[in-house]
Image: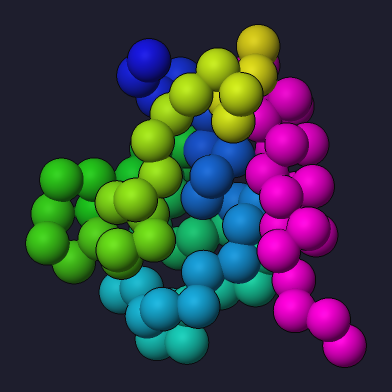
């Protein structure tokens, strides 16, 4: 499966704890990555500056769902399930 063009769910829903160009402290969950274009494409795709977390994401039917809303819902739930206990 390939990324759904213009989706951007994986660049918005999850937190990213490693530096991103323009976001030196990463980004919190639910915050749009500064490297996401207006049409929801990654400016860093294929570049060495792209964070390892982002590189490690592989589109799948489970993660991406049938549409952007399902992808965001899945990633938000995954974010909740992987948060450290407080």
Q: Quadrant of residue 47?
A: bottom left
Q: Quadrant of residue 66?
A: top right
- Residue at 56% x, 73% y: name it: 27
Whether residue 39 is visible to the viewer of this picture, yes or no, is no
- Residue at 87% x, 88% y: name it: 86
Q: Which span is picked out in magenta? A: 67-86
Most foreground residue, 81 or 59? 81
- Residue at 37% x, 80% y: name it: 19
Q: Was residue 3 drawn as part of the magenta stretch in this picture? A: no
Q: Main SS type for the magenta part?
A: helix
Most foreground residue, 11 or 79? 79
Whether residue 76 is visible to the viewer of this picture, yes or no, is yes
For residue 53, above or below residue 22: above
Most foreground residue, 36 or 86? 86
Give the percent coordinates (x, y) of residue 57: 40, 44
Q: Is residue 11 left or right of residue 55?
A: right
Q: Is residue 79 left or right of residue 23?
A: right
Q: Quadrant of residue 3?
A: top left
The residue at the far right in this view is 86
Q: Is residue 72 left or right of residue 63?
A: right
For residue 12, above or below residue 5: below
Give the percent coordinates (x, y) of residue 33: 50, 60
For residue 82, above or below residue 17: above
- Residue at 59% x, 30% y: name it: 63
Give the percent coordinates (x, y) of residue 85: 83, 81
Classify the position of the N terminus by image quarter.
top left
Give the percent coordinates (x, y) of residue 67: 65, 16
């Amino acid at each position: 499966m390939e990324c759904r063009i213009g989706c951007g769910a994986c660049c918005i829903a999850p937190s990213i704890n490693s530096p991103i160009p323009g976001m030196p402290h990463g980004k919190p969950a639910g915050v749009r990555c500064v490297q996401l274009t207006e049409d929801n494409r990654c400016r860093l795709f294929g570049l060495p500056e792209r964070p390892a977390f982002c590189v490690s994401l592989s589109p799948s039917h489970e993660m991406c769902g049938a549409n952007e809303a399902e992808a965001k819902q899945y990633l938000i739930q995954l974010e909740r399930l992987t948060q450290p206990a407080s």
